[in-house]
């Protein structure tokens, strides 16, 4: 966008220069003098080079057409019901102390509140189409928490996802950014399609579907990105409640020629993924089941404002108050943080800075379903806070830590 503005600013400058040399602004005493040759008079060439710049700009916007010259990346992903604990440590790991009174309502089963556990429906990766063996996350991926598997591809690849729905609600996989036909959009609406093109929209409980997503250049990084572009995927069968149920994940597209065999970028030492999201559990499709399973009084008042607030779970990757694994990054390494938000949040890092959109920052704002990639080379060793800066969000637990090691 900045490049675009610069081009228009140049246009304005040349337009003014052009007027000056058309004679209107020249003084009376040089009216009969021959025009002075100067490079700025060479309007034709200036316009030509500007047209070339504009063409380059729009070529970047469009991206090269998809060439099926990559590999097929297969994933086996199932929507699974789990009982998720947002505070498995049972204490405030930011302070290292017990939860304070005002914090307890979100995570403790003090009547009439439900506590820290809820039934969720989340994406999990399996080893094959039988969906019998979970693909276990290695230790340094466990901080991903509730998030689905990170889907990866290089420009030119095709992503094929065998999807199975083991939840009791209809679910789907709707990707951002990549190219899909109507049978792989994963969203039901009156789009003029029928038959096979509808079967991806909402996979019923017990159903399966294969989503095929192509990865053209316009799904990968543009000229002001780094070596990757990041996208979210989520269920869109009933978008609001599906996302509240927990069905979200990240996808990374690496530029052509800049990927390792596993599609990770060759220039990044560590990629990290964080989703800032408030799970409004009173709007969850599992509310009746959660109340039945975790209630602490016979008939909780679901309209009670305190009860509703106690079920507003201010999570980072499904954890509150640093109850998830703390990520470790190396001093001097190239770290790419991929961040998404499902509400309005302001992720902030203590101790180190990063660059995004060409600017150095340590905080930014994200609105609903917004995504941002930031690059950091940490220079400050230690354990640092990492939290949403909205006061009532971090007070409700949207706060964690990261560590920079030598
Ligand atoms: Cu927030």
Image: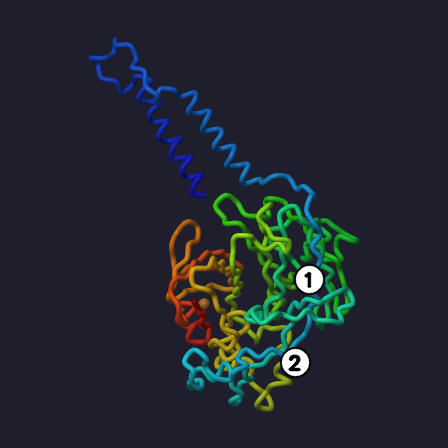
Image quadrant assignment for residue 161? bottom right
Who's the residue at 64% across and 85% down the image? 293
Image quadrant assignment for residue 4? top left
Q: Is residue 209 left or right of residue 65?
A: right
Say few, some or many: other residues with alpha carbon within 10 Å of mark 1 (under 14 / 14 to 19 / 20 or more): many
Q: Nearer the viewer, mark 2 or mark 1?
A: 1
Residue in front for this viewpoint, 72 or 117 = 72
**Viewport quadrant of the N terminus:** top left
Who's the residue at 60% across and 44% down the image? 217
**Viewport quadrant of the C terminus:** bottom left
Q: Which mark is residue 289?
A: 2
Q: CA distance from mark 2 to mark 1?
A: 22 Å
Residue wearing tag 1: 172
Q: How many numbered marks appear? A: 2
Who's the residue at 66% across and 42% down the image? 66
Badge 1 marks a residue whose secondary structure is: loop
Image quadrant assignment for residue 237? bottom right
User: Which residue is situated farthest in the front direction here?
Assistant: 406
Q: Is residue 332 left or right of residue 114?
A: left
Residue in front for this viewpoint, 332 or 64 = 332
Badge 2 marks a residue whose secondary structure is: helix
Residue in front for this viewpoint, 406 or 12 = 406
């Amino acid at each position: 966008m900045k490049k675009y503005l610069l081009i228009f600013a140049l246009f304005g400058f040349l337009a003014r220069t052009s007027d000056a040399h058309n004679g209107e602004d020249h003084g009376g005493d040089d009216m009969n003098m021959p025009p002075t040759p100067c490079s700025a008079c060479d309007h034709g060439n200036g316009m030509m080079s500007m047209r070339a710049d504009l063409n380059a700009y729009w070529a970047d916007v469009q991206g090269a057409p998809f060439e099926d010259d990559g590999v097929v990346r297969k994933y086996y992903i199932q929507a699974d019901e789990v009982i998720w604990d947002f505070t498995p440590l049972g204490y405030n790991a930011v302070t290292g102390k017990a939860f304070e009174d005002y914090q307890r309502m979100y995570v403790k089963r003090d009547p009439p509140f439900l506590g820290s556990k809820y039934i969720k429906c989340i994406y999990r990766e399996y080893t094959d189409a039988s969906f019998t063996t979970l693909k276990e996350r290695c230790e340094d991926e466990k901080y991903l928490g509730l998030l689905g598997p990170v889907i990866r591809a290089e420009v030119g690849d095709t992503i094929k996802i065998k999807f199975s729905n083991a939840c009791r609600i209809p679910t789907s996989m709707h990707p951002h950014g990549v190219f899909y036909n109507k049978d792989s959009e994963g969203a039901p609406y009156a789009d003029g399609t029928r038959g096979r093109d509808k079967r991806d929209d909402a996979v019923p409980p017990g159903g399966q579907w294969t989503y095929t997503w192509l990865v053209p250049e316009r799904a990968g990084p543009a000229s002001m990105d780094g070596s990757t572009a990041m996208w979210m995927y989520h269920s869109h069968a009933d978008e609001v409640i599906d996302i509240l149920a927990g069905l979200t994940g990240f996808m990374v597209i690496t530029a052509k020629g800049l990927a390792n065999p596993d599609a990770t970028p060759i220039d990044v030492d560590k990629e990290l993924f964080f989703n800032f999201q408030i799970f409004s559990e009173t709007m969850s499709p599992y509310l009746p089941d959660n109340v039945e399973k975790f209630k602490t009084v016979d008939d909780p008042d679901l309209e009670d404002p305190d009860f509703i607030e106690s079920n507003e779970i201010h999570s980072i990757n499904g954890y509150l108050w640093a109850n998830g694994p703390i990520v470790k990054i190396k001093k001097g390494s190239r770290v790419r943080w991929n961040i998404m938000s499902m509400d309005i949040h302001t992720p902030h890092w203590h101790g180190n800075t990063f660059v995004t959109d060409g600017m150095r920052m340590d905080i930014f704002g994200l609105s609903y379903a917004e995504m941002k990639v930031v690059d950091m080379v940490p220079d400050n060793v230690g354990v640092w806070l990492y939290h949403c800066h909205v006061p009532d969000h971090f007070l409700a637990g949207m706060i964690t830590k990261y560590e920079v090691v030598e």
